[in-house]
Amino acid sequence: MPTLSEVGGDSSLIKVLAEVANERSRQDGKHGPALDDQHTPSHWIGLIDRTIAKVENTALVLDRSGGWAESAPDDLTTYRETLLRVAALAVAAIQACDRGTSGP
């Protein structure tokens, strides 16, 4: 498996993955792995799905405003931050799965 330094120097990828890792650390600090390990696989999907629904609402606002260039900075920030939460939730679900304790 390649390390971040081996992904070909794509600094935007490294930046985004670092932001996902930071969001994951924030979530873990707030809830901890013990809570994560109580979630079933379908509960993880529900959490991710609810967060996707939030970002979908923001995406519709962005679409109606004319896309990236014409959108309000706050809407772009909300969109991006919510996508980072989706990615971090997916990472949390994978971590729980890898620990072998996802679900009752």
Image: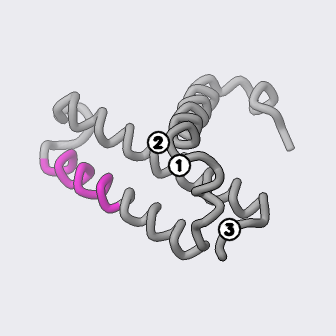
**Residue type indicated by callout 3:** Ser
Residue under label 1, please give it.
87
Residue at the (78%, 25%) spot, across then down = 5
Residue under label 3, please give it.
102
Is-magenta flag for residue 88? no
Screen quadrant of the C terminus: bottom right
What's the CA distance linking mark 2 and mark 3?
22 Å
What's the CA distance linking mark 1 and mark 3?
18 Å
Of the two numbered discs 1 and 3 in the rendering, the one whose residue sits closer to the viewer: 3
Query: Which of these two is toward me, 46 or 84?
Result: 46
Q: Is residue 93 left or right of residue 26?
A: right
Screen quadrant of the N terminus: top right
Residue under label 2, please give it.
84
Image coordinates for residue 53, horizontal then vertical, percent: 32, 62
Asked if disc 2 and disc 1 are in contact, CB closer than 8 Å, the reply is: yes
Q: Give the overall secondary structure of the magenta segment.
A: helix
Asked if disc 1 and disc 3 are in contact, CB closer than 8 Å, the reply is: no
